Image (spheres, rainbow, N blue to C red):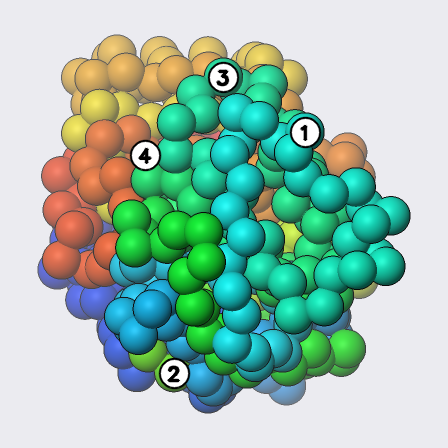
Amino acid sequence: MAFSLGNGQDISYVKEQAEILSSARMKGRGYVDRGLDRAAQHIAAEFKNLGLKPYGKHYFQEFDHKVNTFPGKMELTIDSQEMQPGADFIVDPASPLFAGRLRAQVYDGNNLQTLPSLEVLQEECENCLIVLDMQDVEEKEVLKEARQLKYLLSDFAPVIWLKDEKRTWGVSNQQLEYPIIECASNLLVDGSLVEIKIEAVFESSFTSKNVIGYIPGSKYPDSLIAFTAHYDHLGMMGDDACFFGANDNASGTAYILSLAKHYMDYPPECTLAFIAFAGEEAGLVGSRYFVENPLFPLENLKFVINLDLMGSGVEGITVVNARSQTREFDLLETLNRTHDLLPQIKARGQAPNSDHYYFSEAGVPAIFIYALGGSTAYHDIYDVSSNLTFEEYNDIFKLLTLFVNKL
């Protein structure tokens, strides 16, 4: 596939798109206040403006899935001291609707055998609030067992996991019986009066959209290469806590838009598809739906390049599936050395950690690339566009286009 590299890369465009997609208006590209839909509409509008063709009448592929959402109140008060959602505490993404004023029963994480048995809890726990104090627990096996235990306990009472550690949020397709809350407040002691207000709505059939466009090949239109990235993130945890998802994955979505912009100026010989997936954070449901309901024959798909966490690259990139796609990984390494681009390209084996996975499972050659270095914010309220530097954008962009040219 021959084309000129020219000056197709446009760092101002990729920064602009990442900033738009992670702006407050997008509500974290999640399941509250139409955040996900706003992002889908924006990407489709960009595809249209760039000149990409849709498969069918529009750029959307809709699918339904289960998801737990938090559209309203999100409050935690400890002895009249109000905690800030996202900063001071998070709720487990499977937490249900709940409101109550409870007295804390604190149990030492190093002595969890003092906890009542599950049978006793089932019979006697009324208006209980179980606090697992893990502050002084460092042993990995103890922490692992306690994390499993908190879910068993949540069948009978609200649970607070008390530990000063990085708190990362997520998306769930189910609801617990009682909420689980993670925080690190030193205000919380045995007997503390704790007020909890959580508004949760379980959506049994939420409609999400994959956004798909393509540039037809000038010479081999039935042979395809796909650039993919998920555009969804975690959204809102209540009215105030927004998980903006700048690096994860406004950055990768902005990359595929930038690549589409480039290839519209330098038309490819084979068809290039650009797919922005929804539902990645909910369990890769968008990419799985596409693989099970493809808009083009999967046997025509030569290769998939999935991009996620692309906001820096100052320390290089990692390639997932490198050990199964050895020829392609070797090609990336050769091109990188020849053109003196990135400081390193790390190899990683197969992993079901992004939207390449179901393509690989279906026998389609695929890799997942993520950038190394830069901001450490991940699945928290601090993953914002001001953290994105795109230091190695030009070199990564050049590597990708050189790589596609050799496939």
**SS for tag 3?**
loop
Q: Residue at x 60, y 77 (%)?
A: 98
Label 3 close to label 1 by CB (< 8 Å): no
Q: Is residue 48 above or below residue 139?
A: below
Q: Which residue has dot 2 on it?
A: 239
Q: Amino acid at mark 4?
A: Ala
- Image coords of residue 35 (percent x, y): 44, 80
Of the two numbered discs 3 and 2 in the rendering, the one whose residue sits closer to the viewer: 3
Q: Amino acid at mark 3?
A: Glu
C-alpha span from label 4 to label 2: 32 Å
C-alpha span from label 1 to label 2: 38 Å
Q: Residue at x 58, y 60 (%)?
A: 129
Q: Which mark is residue 353?
A: none
C-alpha span from label 4 to label 1: 44 Å
Q: Is residue 259 visible in the rendered structure shown here?
A: no
Q: Is residue 182 above or below residue 103?
A: above
- Is the residue marked by circle 1 packed among few (<14), some (14-19), or many (20+) residues within 10 Å? few
- Is the residue marked by circle 4 packed among few (<14), some (14-19), or many (20+) residues within 10 Å? many
Q: Which residue has dot 3 on it?
A: 139
Query: Does 235 sit left or right of 315 as displayed?
Result: right
Name which of mark 1 and mark 2 comes first in the sequence: 1
- Is the residue marked by circle 2 packed among few (<14), some (14-19), or many (20+) residues within 10 Å? some
Name which of mark 3 and mark 2 comes first in the sequence: 3
Q: Residue at x 61, y 37 (%)?
A: 147
Q: Which residue is at the front of the view, 177 or 190? A: 190
Name which of mark 4 and mark 2 comes first in the sequence: 2
Q: Which residue has dot 4 on it?
A: 371
Q: Which residue has dot 1 on it?
A: 113
Q: Is residue 102 above or below residue 284?
A: below
**SS for tag 4?**
strand
Name which of mark 3 and mark 4 comes first in the sequence: 3
